Amino acid sequence: MKAMKRIFLTLFFAVYCIVCFSQTWPKTTPAYYAMKKQADEYKVKYRGSVNASLRFGDPFVGRYGITIVNGISVGDYFSAGLGTGIFYYTQRYYKETWQIPIFLNFETNLSKGHKLTPYLDVNVGYSSLNSFFVAPSAGVKLDLDGKRALKFSLGYNYERYTGSLDKMYDTSEVVYKVPVLDEFGNQVYENGKPVYKEMIGNFVELNDVRKKLKGLVFSIGFQF
């Protein structure tokens, strides 16, 4: 009986020592900090942003936009999310157009631990007007408090429409000069000058004239 009690007390003491040792030893060793650093590098947390953008460079169609992205970041370098917003188009020959995009956002930081952090990102998505678009960009983040930052970027936007965009806004018998485009949506030139055709009447479908939109995009955002 005494032998059993001695064995039981010995096992209990051994387990107690192991538990106490496991709670105190790792936090005081280089191995613990190395494991913690590695875990922090792949820590997953929420990441969101709100962005305002202006597209320019297209002679016929301008665009203003406000978007919001909700997603996750993995460590300090990579994040991905789902975005939506509103795009407002001002058109040289046609009435204004609104559309709602839905897109995937992928972003990677090129450094960490600095007040200014360079980054790359890309948006790939689809809009409410049957438009596929892709928009890669490069920019910098201005760190505010370690969690929030201001974003400034310059990128390229390409959109390809598969349906009718809008109608010409014309309530009078005014003659409009409309650019002549080839089958790929590019401006046709003759002797180095752009070719136009005259159109008279009401409501000419825009998709008969313009299928492809592209230009540079400047964006300002707030990341949280």
Image (cartoon, rainbow, N blue to C red):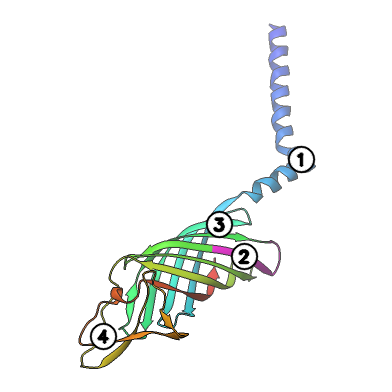
- Numbered label attached to residue 119: 2
Residue at 72% of width from left, 28% of height from top? 18
Residue matched to label 3: 79
Q: Nearer the viewer, mark 2 or mark 4?
A: 4
Residue matched to label 1: 31
* Image position, residue 213 (x, y; %): 41, 73
Q: Quadrant of residue 22?
A: top right
Check contact, mark 3 vs mark 1: CB within 8 A: no
- Answer with mark 3 or mark 4, whichever residue precedes in sequence: 3
**Mark 3 packing: few (<14 Cα in 10 Å), some, or many (20+)?**
many
- Say above or below: 42 vs 193: above
Q: Nearer the viewer, mark 3 or mark 2?
A: 2
Disc 3 and disc 1: Cα gap in Å?
28 Å
Callout 2 amino acid: Tyr
- Answer with mark 2 or mark 4, whichever residue precedes in sequence: 2
| Span colored in magenta | 111-121
* Image position, residue 189 (x, y; %): 43, 81
**Mark 1 packing: few (<14 Cα in 10 Å), some, or many (20+)?**
few
Location of the N terminus by quadrant is: top right
Callout 1 amino acid: Ala
Q: Nearer the viewer, mark 3 or mark 4?
A: 4
In the image, taking residue 178 as reference, residue 107 lies left or right, namely: right
Check contact, mark 3 vs mark 2: CB within 8 A: no
Q: Nearer the viewer, mark 4 or mark 1?
A: 4
Residue matched to label 4: 169
- Answer with mark 3 or mark 2, whichever residue precedes in sequence: 3
Residue in the foreground of this view, choosing between 119 and 1:
119
* Image position, residue 138 (x, y; %): 59, 68
